[in-house]
Image: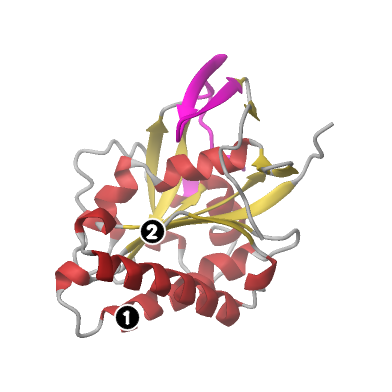
Amino acid sequence: MTRFGRRLLLAVDAKGYGGVDVLTQRQFQEAIRRLLGEAADAAGLERDRWSTQEGGDSVLAVLPEGASEPDLVDPFMRQLDAGLRAFNHGRVPEAWLRLRAAVHFGTASPAPTGFVGRAPVEIGRILDSRVLRAALAAAPGACLALAVSSTVFNDVVREAYTTFRAQEFREVRIAEKEYAGRAWLWVPGHDTRTLDLAGEDDGDTDPGKAGARGGEPAGARPPNASTSINGEVVNVNYGTIQMESAVFGIRN
């Protein structure tokens, strides 16, 4: 029987990685690993206890039980943005390292080849969503665009466990493959409410009307279906996602 557990997850991905030369790709990979470590140290998040999957310009991390959600959302992200700005200083804009990041909290239990549960799939959908990509594209001077799930926004930001004001985030609707839900965007140094998200239908963006923990609007859960993620089959069965093969190979 799979052990039930809820974990804090972080995912990051670099913009434009495939369009730069090999030397720059190597610099990006080294910088991502270093900057995540520095941000984790600044936030007291014990980077050596994370379980991670690294894919060149992307990282999926499942943090240990008890990891602090406020610390990942606030000091970690502020330090990550500062580190990105320092790395990009003096570089031509085409060689800037710019990251999309997502934070989520949900079911993710250890399995023989990684983690199973809804959260690893959901955070992948948030990270790869058109609206998060559009937010980073609409702010060319930004080095970071963050999306937190409604779960995290409601319990951490909205309840004032960070130094952020709720108004600094913008609520957006995400519908990616079998996932449908809400996320909240933050782009350092930019008013997310004024960013052109290429026609994204935000719905009601009043921070006082955020959804309940979990973030799915009523009726958003799809019927039984199968889909493919990175070439692997995922069965979606009314809230239970079963990994029939290793979608996320996690390593310590």
Asked which quadrant contains residue 112, the reply is top right
Image disc number at residue 57: 2
Is 98 left or right of 79, judged from the image as shown? left
Is 173 left or right of 16, judged from the image as shown? right
Percent of width and height locating residue 149: 51, 48
- Image point (33%, 49%), residue name: 132
User: At numbered mark 1, what does the secondary structure look like: helix, strand or loop?
Assistant: helix
Check whether the beta carbons of the residues at disc 1 and disc 2 lie within 8 A of each other: no
Q: Mark 1 — residue?
A: 87
Image disc number at residue 240: none
Q: What residue type is disc 1 on?
A: Phe
* Label 1 CA crowd tier, 10 Å (few <14, some 14–19, many 20+): some
Task: Work out whether residue 211 can be spotted.
Answer: no
Q: From what the image shows, is residue 104 above or below residue 191? A: above
Q: From what the image shows, is residue 81 above or below residue 118? A: below
Asked whether residue 227 is drawn in magenta, I would say yes
Task: Work out whether residue 84 can be spotted.
Answer: yes
Quadrant the N terminus occupies: top right
Depth check: give the residue in front, 186 or 22. 22
Percent of width and height locating residue 130: 30, 41
Q: CA distance from mark 1 to mark 2?
A: 15 Å
- Image point (56%, 82%), residue name: 42
Is 54 left or right of 119, judged from the image as shown? left
User: At numbered mark 2, what does the secondary structure look like: helix, strand or loop?
Assistant: loop
Q: From what the image shows, is residue 247 above or below residue 72? A: above
Percent of width and height locating residue 190: 27, 66
- Image point (62%, 51%), residue name: 250
Quadrant the C terminus occupies: bottom right
Q: What residue type is disc 2 on?
A: Asp
**Residues drawn in magenta:** 208-236
